[in-house]
Image: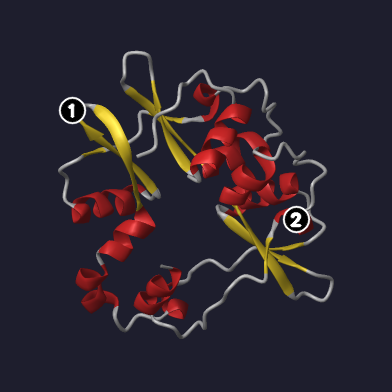
Amino acid sequence: MSDPVSPGLTVSDVAQVMTARRVDAVTVMNKEGNLVGILTDNDLTRRVIAEKGDLSVLKVKDVMTTSPIFVDHDTHVTDALNEMITGQFRHLPVLKHGKPIGFLDITRCVLGSLDKLGGLIQSSTLDSVIKTPPLFLPLKTTVYEASRAMKRDNQTSVLAIDDQGNVKGIFTTKDIVLRVLAAKLDPNTTSLVRVVTPNPQTVPQNMTVVDALRFMN
């Protein structure tokens, strides 16, 4: 379980916390012990980096998602998964006796339900479900510019390419927290070549969705 953070924590400090815990989301709890928000790597990308926010001044309460949807600890995983799909969000806080005790991640929920979902999507291939083309950006693109592009195109990652158009790396919203904010790099001057994951693994477009999910696991 990842302990909640205070709404008064600075964005700079919460990035350090998320990096230390190796998480991409945290719950936010007030002094009374009530859940008041959720902060994710996507929030930090779109509401801080893409808007050139001051990391040392902005607080968690300024950029978190308030009044988040949550589920109780005894909610069936299928119901929780339906909640995330309906709401189109990746993280779902879990409460017990009104207090946050952790997160459900949509990827883990799907992986945990593969046996039930397999029959429904067994024959579906990646090219039949991918509706949005990937976002390609030059390696020299700054983190700020990449975050603006991700926000504009509603993406959580970009593929970094060289001058010949070859994919050289992948850069995600999680990388913004772990490799940029936590390292105290300047998003306005740091280029993708410095912070991408090089030579990302790939899968063929005719791979089934089930096999792709298992590959990710």
Mark 1: which secondary structure?
loop
How busy is the neighbourhood of tag 2: few (under 14 within 10 Å), some, or many (20 plus)? many
Q: Amino acid at mark 2?
A: Leu
Tag 2 residue: 192
Say above or below: 103 vs 127: above
Q: Residue at x 50, y 46 (%)?
A: 22
Sequence-first disc among 2 and 1: 1
Residue 26 location, x and y as percent?
Answer: 44, 36
| Side of 115 relative to 217 (left or right) | left
| Quadrant position of the N terminus in the picture | top left
Residue 53 location, x and y as percent?
Answer: 68, 29
Residue 147 location, x and y as percent?
Answer: 66, 47
Asked whether residue 50 appears in the rendered view, the answer is no
Say above or below: 61 vs 210: above
Tag 1 residue: 97
| Quadrant position of the C terminus in the picture | bottom left
